[in-house]
Image: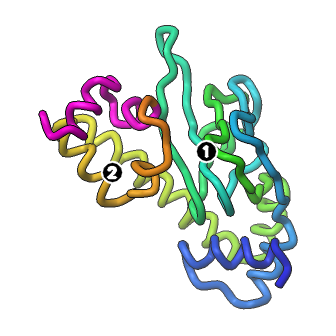
Amino acid sequence: MDRRLQAAERIVAHTIPLSGESVEQFADILIRHELVKGEFFLKEGEIARSMGMVMEGMVRQFYWKKKREVTEHITYEDHLFVCLESFIRQVPGSFYVEALEPSVIYKVPYEGLHRLMDKNPEILKLYCVILESSLLISQKKADAQCRQSVGERYCQLEREHPEIIRRAPQIYIASLLGMTPETLSRIRAGKL
């Protein structure tokens, strides 16, 4: 099976059902991109010309605040990532996307996606579902930061995304959860 078609099917499996023809059309716009560990998919000041689906590996989105990195999201196999404002508005963004492991990403290019959406209502619906999902993930994270203790946030991440707990460096997990690495160590040791 064509790798782009396989990537398209994996994206669709996590969103909404599409006709075979729509999946093939979607696959045709995907672009394979490989990253080595530590390589950037996107840097601050660049325009997010595509969203990405992680086929293999793990990436993190982060930004700088008061001279320190703040991890916003960590994404692994079969999950999409997008720097939302930059992608939607096609303006320079404030996020970096960095590979935490050697990674294979399938880019969903802005231009190709919009051309396809103009012709195919199923793809337009797919795009709406992807955007809704991204907004809900961001809202859920913001709510957790306000309403949950650090221990509750860790338990939720462990329950919902054990791959992040297992594979991501502790410093990035702590940043993702809005805590220091020392606090994360105490939680893992059962002291909090």
The amino acid pointed to by label 1 is Val
Query: Does 29 appear above or below 20?
Result: above
Which x, y percent locates residue 77? 59, 61
Q: Which mark is residue 59?
A: 1
Across and down, in percent, residue 41 comes to 74, 39
Q: Which mark is residue 181?
A: none
Any magenta on residue 33?
A: no
Could you tell me which quadrant the C terminus lies in?
top left
How would you rate the neighbour count of disc 2 (Cα within 10 Å): few for under 14, some for 14-19, many for 20 or more?
Answer: some
Magenta stretch contains residue 176: yes
On residue 157, the disc is 2
| Circle 1 SS class | strand
* Residue in view at x 61 percent, y 45 percent: 59
- What residue is drawn where x is 74% and y is 81%? 23
* Picture quarter with the N terminus: bottom right
Q: Residue at x 66, y 29 (%)?
A: 93
- Give the secondary structure at mark 2: helix
Tell me the magenta residue range.
Answer: 172-192
Sequence-wise, which precedes: disc 2 or disc 1? Answer: 1
